Image: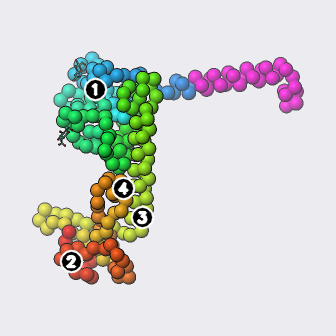
Amino acid sequence: MSLKTLATSPLSVITFVVLLLALYLRFSIKFDSAQPAQRLFNAEELALFNGTDEGLPILLGILGSVYDVTKGKSHYGSGGGYNHFAGRDASRAFVSGNFTGDGLTDSLRGLSSAEVKSVIDWRDFYSRTYKYVGKLVGRYYDSQGNPTKYLKGVEAKAARGAQLLEKQKTEEAKQPACNSRWSQGEGGEVWCEVGYPRLVQRPLEIAMTGKMSRRCACFEESQLGQTGLELYEGCDYHANRCKA
Ligand SMILES: *[C@@H]1O[C@H](CO)[C@@H](O)[C@H](O)[C@H]1NC(C)=O
Ligand SMILES: *[C@@H]1O[C@H](CO)[C@@H](O)[C@H](O)[C@H]1NC(C)=O
């Protein structure tokens, strides 16, 4: 059958449409079944899966995504070192390390973009390592299971954090970092194979973390007059090794 008859014969057109429909259904069903099972939890329901009841899986929430961490029972189960993450969403504690009282919250209020990025990285870790089982209705998902404004805000902030981090990496690659070592007996030491060690501000650090930060970079003779370079205390102008 030529293309022309295919296009003009009504029967072929119908066959063609049916075929398209069948293909569409087949793939949409396939797509649906590839989606992870979606269960919606509220905080009270999630709390039951805290590892106390041996007959129940152990579940953990992060940014409102719920994962089954039963295979990590020795950590997440009763008495395990990460048990405080079980049966709740303690997103903030992944970066704050505060596992007491109000530290175990899903609020990321006031965290820097670098910290928020790090919580997103943790969620990526769980989605790679454990089985996704559903969503926690609350701060990150509404009662329909749709992402809230808060989640979108968090993801946008993390994206800015990631961008800044990338930019910082590129910028700093232009000026080689000092070698460094530290020992109990001798304290810290920095040195350059080529050039001279100087302390410099990391301007993007403020935007990312809200904190001032400096790093040690190696500068050649011709660059030493640049503004913003600070000599290590007690170190000679032309020393290539300094106590830090
Ligand atoms: C932990 O889970 C058990 C049942 O699985 C439940 O009875 C208990 O109340 C939960 N603990 C908390 C603090 O929610
Ligand atoms: C942990 O968080 C709680 C509540 O926000 C706070 O009172 C406490 O000082 C924090 N602990 C540490 C070690 O930061």
What is the distance, in whole Å, between disc 2 and disc 1 at their CAs? 54 Å
Pick the residue in front: 132 or 101.
101
Q: Position of residue 91 (x, y in %)?
A: 31, 36
Q: Which mark is residue 171?
A: 3
Which secondary structure, mark 1?
loop
Q: Residues within 10 Å of mark 2 (few under 14, many from 20)?
A: some
Q: Which residue is mark 2?
A: 235
Mark 1 Cβ inside 8 Å of ligand 1: yes
User: What amino acid type should be assigned to the residue bearing mark 2?
Assistant: Cys
Secondary structure under tag 2 reads loop
Specify the amino acid type for callout 4: Ala
**Magenta segment, which residues?**
1-29
Relative placement, left or right, of 169 versus 108 is: right
Which label belongs to residue 207?
4
Ligand 2 closer than 8 Å to label 3 CB: no
Instruction: State left or right for residue 153 relative to residue 58.
Output: right
Whether 29 is drawn above or below 128: the answer is: above
